[in-house]
Amino acid sequence: MKELSTIDKCLAIISKTENGDLLSPDDLKLTENRVNDRLSEYGLAVLDKLYEQVTAGVYKKPYFHGVEFMTNDHEGYVYFKGEHVEHYSSFWAYTLDAKNSLKTLQQYCLYLENKGGEINSVKAMFMSFDKGFAEYKKNELDSLLNGGAIVFTVVTPKTDKSSEDSFRLSGAVHTEEEIRNSPEYKDFVDRQRFEGDYVFDVCTYKYGSGVPRPASENELDVINCCYDFLQENNLLSETVSYQFESRVQEQNNDDEVDFDYDCEDEEEFEP
């Protein structure tokens, strides 16, 4: 029996997934990239795996950003266990900032589910106003600390053309170079749609009363859920504060994300 070409495999994938509607946006883009002859050898291997899953009837849409229970569709709508809860614009949806936002949204949905509440986009709109959720995550953070203390740094870029857009880093950050080399700073720069002069406010905080240590990734995720609550209740101790200036160049962001399956992604692919 003659082996199918990769183009034939793409056609089979599309036909068996309701014209691609059942695929995740990145899996659909994978097939489009093959049709346009834009896949590396690694990308072709990923395509073969996708073909096997679809034709065997075992394909499941992967979690959006790898965040459990969260999926997205081709129009940018975001779902928790199949329930529509948000919409992410295409130029922002695959940024690190969006991933961190998605983690918080997932935690809020789990919180509502645990309470037996309805989960939908209207409920999700009130996430930032739900003091019960913030206090719940603050208590979770306390359990993670177990009597200790954590240190993290908040970087807030400011310009007269945009609103505040803070990101958080683990530990005490004292130099501009450390900030500029962080994935969070690079993500901020990559998603800017205009150039401008920025002033970066840098504040390092300690939370807890024990011996301080850098916050873990999990602890930062929890802090993202209750940071405003901690601030409003004066539960954070500021240890370092300074500013630096930087000019951010305008980025040529397309409205459509281009998923590039190259060798740098290889560790995430499990054949």
Image (cartoon, helix red, strand yellow):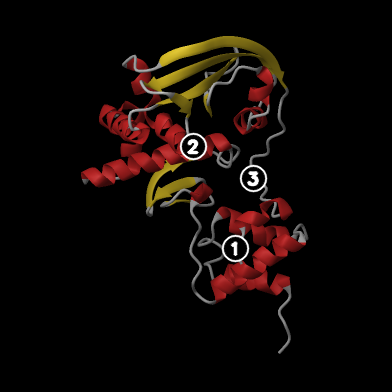
Amino acid bearing label 1: Glu
- Residue at far top of view: 242
| Disc 2 packing (10 Å; few <14; some 14–19; many ≥20) | few
Question: Which residue of the protein is positioned furthest toward the left in this rendering?
Answer: 116
Q: In the rendered image, which quarter contains the C terminus?
A: bottom right
Label 1 secondary element: loop
Q: Earlier in the sequence, mark 2 or mark 3?
A: 2
Q: Quadrant of residue 252?
A: top right
164 relative to 93, above or below: above
Disc 1 or 3, which lies upstream in sequence? 3
User: Which residue is rendered at x = 52% and y = 19% of the image?
Assistant: 164
- Left/right placement of residue 133 relative to residue 86 reads left
Residue to which mark 3 is pinned: 257
Which three-letter amino acid code belongs to the residue tagged 2?
Answer: Glu
Q: Using the image, determine if residue 114 lies above or below residue 152.
A: below
**Residue at numbered disc 2:** 217
User: What's the CA distance linking mark 1 and mark 3?
Assistant: 23 Å
Residue at image coords 41%, 49%? 79
Q: Nearer the viewer, mark 1 or mark 3?
A: 1
Which residue is depicted at the point 56% across and 76% down? 55
